[in-house]
Image (cartoon, rainbow, N blue to C red):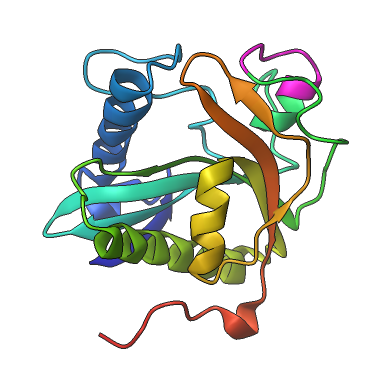
Amino acid sequence: MRHITFDLSTMHEHGSAFFDYLGLRKRFFVDILKWDIPHNDKFEMDQYDNPTAWYSLCIHEGEVIGGTRVMPTTARWGKHSYMLKDAREGVLDSIPHDAMPSDIISPYVWEMTRLVISPDLRRAEDRARCLQHVGQGLYDIAEAQNVSEYMGISAVALIRVLRQLGFPLERMGTPYHDAADRRNYTVMRMPVHLQNQRLLAAE
């Protein structure tokens, strides 16, 4: 496994990885979780996949097996900001407007969304390794872009897993239940400590 990071201006350097990630998102969020989000028969893509976004993906044998999207909380693209702020302002109705306790606008705080792992990864150790690579990519982006903290919505169960892998996650908001996929979610924050950024064992 390995990880790559890019924004839309450099996605061409990684072949079809960006679109493979969109395809993985469609397979998981639409086909499995049944989320009502923009998609066609191949890809899931929304208004936050714009030039303000960055991506951290995990690759194995040429296939995208995991990834996430991040963007600064200062982002603006048309009428949209970042996902949680738009939810607070009533632009989105799929997330409770009070999921995040207060607005956050800082070039040093970035939102993380659309974290996904391939459902084909059955073994816990493979899923953990994939998450570690995605996380290492987040640290690489943080170092390059001067990010001090990531925040975003996460499944409550996933927070426990990520903590076990060494990610310093903390809850920010009150958990809520999504009736569509029957999962519990909450807003989390992850301070970035670059001096402790190496999550991966030597390969």
**Considering only vertical position in the picture, is 193 above or below 98?**
below
Please tell me in which quadrant of the rendered image residue 178 appears: top right
**Considering only vertical position in the picture, is 151 above or below 175?**
below
| The stretch drawn in magenta includes residue 174 | no
Closer-to-camera residue (16/29): 29
Where's residue 189, x and y in %? 70, 53
Residue 135, can we see it? Answer: yes
> Which residue lies at the image location 81% right of the left edge and 50% below the top edge?
106
Where's residue 34, x and y in %? 38, 16
In the displayed orientation, state which residue is furthest to the right: 102
- Which image quarter holds the C terminus? bottom left
> Which residue lies at the image location 39% right of the left edge and 78% below the top edge?
200
Residue 44, can we see it? Answer: no
Magenta span:
87-94
- Which image quarter holds the N terminus? bottom left
Where's residue 134, x and y in %? 41, 59
**Considering only vertical position in the picture, is 89 above or below 148?**
above
| Image position of 62 (left or right of 17) | left
> Which residue lies at the image location 26% right of the left edge and 27% below the top edge?
27
